[in-house]
Amino acid sequence: MKRIHFTLIVSAILIYGCNNNSVKSREEASKDSTNAMAESMDDVSNASVNFATAVAASNMKEIALGKLALKNANYGRLKEFAQKMIDAHEKANKDLQTACYSAGVTLPSGLAKADQEEVDKMAGKEGKAFDRDYIKKMVSEHQKTMERLDAAASNMKDVSLQNYAKKTLPVVKAHLEEARTILEDVRKQYDPTQFDDVESYQ
């Protein structure tokens, strides 16, 4: 009788232990799932913030450089392009603000220190020197923006920002091609030896 009673006690302990382990296992699985979801949300948030901040910074820098070009550029076609960039990037930034409102991302209100220093450096140039550096910068800036938009159009998890990228990408591609054409035009207008690195912008 004692042996039966002992056996029942051992069985009860084993069953309790298994049930308790099962509860712990479910709790741990739930905790792991919650942590994974939080990490995933952080990743989405970081991706959204990084993308939106970079594109906004590029928009603001191109607007600032465009305004400089209206004053400092020597070649008339550059002034026309500069005004086009001001209008286009002001619109792009408004569209980005709308997308960021849906995504819950706050955009920077002004140029970053490094970008402001870059604009200030350009402000000290004029005429041919300004023309050369401005159009080369327009090619490189649009190249970087195009790559960001292209990646976001394919991989961005936030729908509003992904739609922004898809909508803006063709516009930026067109601007990049126009900037490359003007770069070659400016190169022909001035001393070609000043554009010995032109191939890196094609």
Image (cartoon, grey):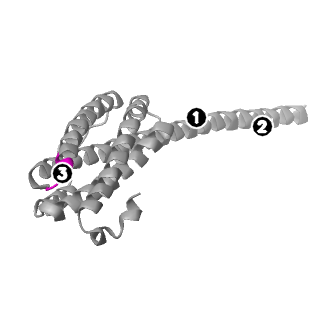
Above or below — where is 176 with respect to 160?
below
Q: Which residue is mark 3?
A: 65
Q: Are marks 1 and 2 in contact (CB under 8 Å)?
A: no
Residue in the image at 40% along x and 46% along y: 146
Q: Earlier in the sequence, mark 2 or mark 3?
A: 2
Secondary structure category for the residue under label 1: helix
Q: Nearer the viewer, mark 2 or mark 3?
A: 3
Q: Is residue 192 left or right of residue 25?
A: left
Residue in the image at 64% along x and 34% along y: 26
Q: Is residue 36 left or right of residue 174?
A: right
Residue placed most toward the observer, 1 or 151: 151
Residue placed most toward the observer, 17 or 137: 137
**Residue 196: x, y in percent?**
34, 70
Residue placed most toward the observer, 182 or 13: 182
Alpha carbon separation for disc pair 2 and 3: 75 Å
How dense is the environment of label 2, judged by Cα within 10 Å: few (below 14), some, or many (20 and up)? few
Q: Is residue 168 left or right of residue 191?
A: right
Q: Please give the label number shown on residue 14.
A: 2
Q: Please give the label number shown on residue 13.
A: none
Q: Which residue is mark 1?
A: 30
The stretch of residues the image draws in magenta is 74-79
